[in-house]
Amino acid sequence: MEPFTHIGVSRMGADFTFQVYIISSSRYSRGPITAKNFLNYKHVVRKSQENAYLENGFENVISFTDELINSYTKVFNYLVDHAPEDVIAIVDDDIDFFKYRTDKIEKIKSAEIVQSEFERLGQIIYDLELGLAFGPPNSIPYNYTSEFSWLGIPGAWKIINRDKIKARMDAQIDRNVDIDHVLQEVLLNRVCIDAKYLCDEAYKDKITRSSGSLYSRNSIESSIDQMKLRWGKYFRYDAKKNVPYILVSR
């Protein structure tokens, strides 16, 4: 383990501590993107890339030995295991902006509001002694049915109550690791918080019009097969629409 003594602890209040961690790898050339949406955050990068991030305008950068965090599952589990705060948010590095989704879609223009929403969700799972909260993968209006749900398909950010989380990110699942994580948590802790009202919009490169995240067909199919073997009737994938479903009823 590498100590977090050089990081410091973000204090939210007398009851618990909270910190936003933006995880990134090899995306330093386009500059910081997600960070503009938060007041208090830290970029988590590999030690070998720390200087490159600093040279490209990234602030609040912390780094760890490459082998400790050289995959999404590794960096996620490492932060859950070793971060000094009680509640942490682990956020992708390619979020352009956040928006509210209720009876209408409204872009959130203030980092203060986004920060307060994340802290509010952190307070909720801390008070309820739950392990996990997350946002949806898209902001399609007809997918909104309520402000909160007890499970769902996760998107680009998660909030973790470190003392209560029971699920672990599993590298074997690869492409659907986030969904597997939610199913584990529902199995072991019974309830998650899906904040269906708080959505994000992914950054798109002006030339390619994509976020830069690519997956091979073979890795997607392998991941789907593993999910079906592990979760059986509780997981379904619509290949025509490229949409996964969680089929757990209360």
Image (cartoon, rainbow, N blue to C red):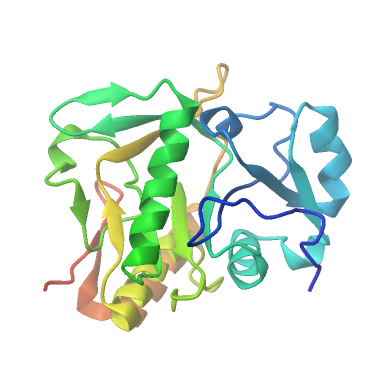
Residue positioned 49% across, 28% down in the render = 111
Q: Residue 60 at what x, y percent from top left?
A: 74, 39
Viewer-closest of 188 and 82: 82
- Split into 4 quadrants, where in the image is the N terminus? bottom right
Q: Is residue 144 above or below residue 184?
A: above
Residue 26 location, quadrant? top right
Q: Is residue 202 above or below residue 158?
A: above
Q: Can you see residue 203?
A: yes
Residue positioned 85% across, 53% down in the render = 47
Viewer-closest of 15 and 147: 15
Residue positioned 24% across, 48% down in the render = 240
Q: Residue furthest top?
A: 206
Horizontal arrangement in the rendering, residue 193 relative to residue 23 (left or right): left
Horizontal arrangement in the rendering, residue 68 relative to residue 171 (left or right): right
Q: Residue 120 at what x, y percent from top left?
A: 37, 48
- Split into 4 quadrants, where in the image is the C terminus? bottom left
| Number of numbered discs overlaid on the protein picture | 0
Q: Can you see residue 97?
A: no
Viewer-closest of 121 and 196: 121
Q: Is residue 235 above or below residue 63?
A: below
Q: Residue furthest front?
A: 14
Q: Residue 105 at what x, y percent from top left?
A: 23, 25
Q: Is residue 240 above or below residue 246?
A: above
Residue 102 location, quadrant? top left
Q: Residue 27 at what x, y percent from top left?
A: 70, 37
